[in-house]
Image: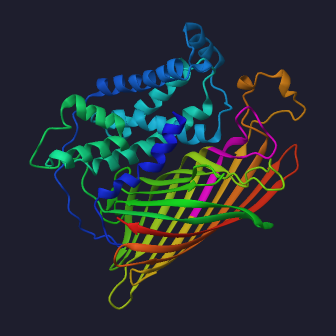
Amino acid sequence: MKKLALLFMCLFSIWTANAQNFPQTPPRNYFTDSIATPRYRPWLAAGEVVGVNMLVWSFNRYITNVDFARINSHTIKDNFKTGPIWDTDKFSTNLVAHPYHGSLYFNAARSNGMSFWRSIPFTVGGSFMWEFFMEAEPPSINDLFATSFGGVALGEITYRLSDLFIDERSTGAERVGREILSGVLSPIRAFNRLITGDAWRTSTTKQRALPSVPINFILNAGPRYLADREQPDDGIASMNLSIRLDYGDPYNDDSYSPYEWFQFRAGVDLFSSQPLVTQVSVIGALWGKTIWEKKDRHLTWGIFQHFDYYDSDMKSKKDKNYVAPYRISQAAAAGPGFIYTKNATPEDKVDVYAEFYVNAVALGASVSDYMKLEERDYNLGSGYNIKAFTGLTYKKQWSFLLNLENYHIFTWKGYDPDLDFSTVDLERLNVQGEKSNARLTIFSTHFAYYSPKRWNITLTNRYFSRHTRYKYYDNVATATSDVILSVGFRI
């Protein structure tokens, strides 16, 4: 499940290549196709949520034969008696694989006619069922948060992207290809289209569930070099794939509904000791409203959901046990934000944009310098996050961007530093990590040239500054930077 989730997270945006395109500054009035709302089938949605859990459990029990899948009435009773605790799973498992699992629950509801808000209880319910009934180990507090909140974010994105491929006017090989690509993005939706016959039924309209919107999709690839600022010669080189997806237009309507506008960013590192997925970032509008317009200038504010995941693994040549320089996640975060844009005019050929967000983080995680509990080498907690992005583009071709992200995660429930871990059941230790607070600041600059023929060349430099203050241990500060030179295409 974990590897499958990581693979889908890397590939689902790549397959949006057939999506509608738009220029760097999207038009204010774009075409809206007739839509066909899926039939309202809440009982089928609930059955599919249960079916997803049974399918994953069966794989764990009869294929991989893991101990936690050996469930019975006693394990279920014990789970309710023990109650939720903080688990010890890997960083990628807890903060990427579980959100993807939650996205399947969400898509079961969305593809059966539920709205965004009505799909949330199905996601929460699926997570509750899995944690209390489907594992022979105590329910996980962090999994309940990550699966539910992260599942909503990734679920709505994959649902909307899968909708871009549906076109019931098409036939033959094109129709098969469209159904496959839509199914890769949203497997539960594909299942529903098969059992209802929609997968091969033809129509005079596209029969999409959502209106057409402008899409900006850019895929870049190039070398990346990551190094400690104090040891620049002792770094790691890799091949980096970066994905950028902008969905919708935040200024098209006076107000807009959940995820009518969102951004998705992802980074994948190949041919190195770096984690496969090094970045996943989502900003999705839960609600927004244009509050000021004047000719070519627009200002929108709203409430935005955020999902962020940064991972690294830089083992020094001198010290093979060197801890990851940075690792941060906010799986459950939301808050207010502002988006400003000034479009270029014949007199002034410069586009300007700015974004500013402040978020409360209900569940976050940061790398630990001292703790190692089974597969867990990070601290969990809550906190806040501030993001500020700005940039300008000259003649739609030359861009300069500045991004600043600041994450501050507090680990409230720590453990006694004199604790003898050899005498403790680690699965029931029930701590967030070492009592501490961690701040990660990411400052990045981007220079890019966008050719009229859709290709681009980009130079990116990012600076990662981490400061972790511990109650019982020495404080730790790291400074890491990377450089990425990439070439890509806008599709």
Q: In this view, which residue lies farthest toward the right?
A: 418
Judge by depth and name the residue closer to the eye, 436 or 290.
436
Q: In this view, which residue lies farthest toward the front?
A: 271
Left or right: residue 257 versus residue 76 is: left
Q: In this view, which residue lies farthest toward the top?
A: 73
Q: Give the quarter of the image for residue 68.
A: top right
Highlighted range, magenta: 364-387
Judge by depth and name the residue closer to the eye, 331 or 134.
134
Judge by depth and name the residue closer to the eye, 383 or 141.
141
Left or right: residue 198 versus residue 423 is: left
Q: Is residue 480 above or below residue 79?
A: below
Magenta stretch holds residue 58: no
Magenta stretch holds residue 384: yes
Q: Is residue 191 above or below residue 160?
A: above
Q: Position of residue 182 (x, y in %)?
A: 31, 44
Q: Could you tell me if residue 179 is visible in this image? A: yes
Q: Position of residue 186 (x, y in %)?
A: 35, 40
